[in-house]
Image (tube, helix red, strand yellow):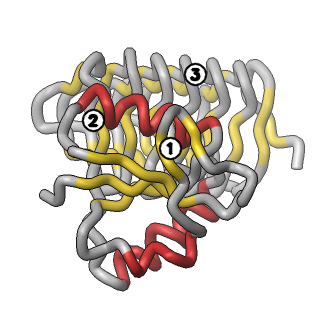
Amino acid sequence: MKNKLLIIGASGHGKVIADIAFKLNKWESIAFLDDDETINLSMGIKNIGKVKDVIKFINSYEVFVAIGDNEIREKVQMKLEQVNASIPTLIHPNAIIGKHVDVGIGTVVMAGVVINSCTRIGKGCIINTGATIDHDNKIGDYVHISPGAHLAGTVTVGQGSWLGIGSIVSNNISITSNCKIGAGAVVIKDITETGTYIGVPARRIY
């Protein structure tokens, strides 16, 4: 493991990532890369360049993509993988992780999260504050599970999907890739068509 961490993205999500990194106390130094030239310092951490500059740092830094947009996060992380960057997984010390849980590279698990046994979380995911993911779930790559979302047992979420704050997914449900589940929506049957779903029970609006 390299002893420096470079966080791509210095805005709100990046700040949370930095806070988790500080709590983990694994790195001697932390820096940001952000294309916003008005950001010189965030949380006391220097912005040392633009995203395109990352290639200069991959030999001495581990690199974490702190971009909330699933599609952009995927593009940036894929480029990092192509140049063999070292990409960590960040798990907040106050998260509860069960046995036989696999968490992919570039994924962050935030404070108060519970992930129960025999669950697989893909790479580049955001498992946000206070979310719960029960046993035998399969969460695809580059998924965002928002704060306070709750997934029951044996749920599958396809790559690139986004589950809004406070959403609920009943047990034995499958959600296809690249879906958006609105805040507070309740999913009680399989979602097989990509789209945006809201309401109780969740229904497709477009």
Mark 3 closeness class: few <14, some 14–19, many ≥20 residues within 10 Å: many
Give the residue displayed 44% in from the left and 38% down from the top: 17
Mark 1 closeness class: few <14, some 14–19, many ≥20 residues within 10 Å: many
Callout 3: SS: strand
Mark 2 closeness class: few <14, some 14–19, many ≥20 residues within 10 Å: many
Callout 2: SS: loop
Q: Which residue is mark 2?
A: 136
Q: Which residue is mark 3?
A: 168
Vertical relation: 81 (above or below) 117: below
The disc, 1 or 2, on the residue closer to the chain's N-terminal end is 2
**Can residue 176 be spotted in the picture?**
no
**Residue 111's spot in the image, x, y percent?**
39, 20
Give the residue displayed 36% in from the left and 61% down from the top: 63
Amino acid type at circle 1 is: Ser
Where does the N terminus fall, quadrant-wise?
A: bottom left
Give the residue displayed 35% in from the left and 76% down from the top: 81
Q: Which mark is residue 174?
A: 1
Amino acid type at circle 2 is: Asp
Residue 50 falls left or right of residue 28: right
Task: Report, in whole angstroms, how far the alpha carbon at label 3 lies from the one at label 2.
Answer: 16 Å
Foreground residue, 175 or 52?
Answer: 52
Count how many numbered circles sit on residues in the image: 3
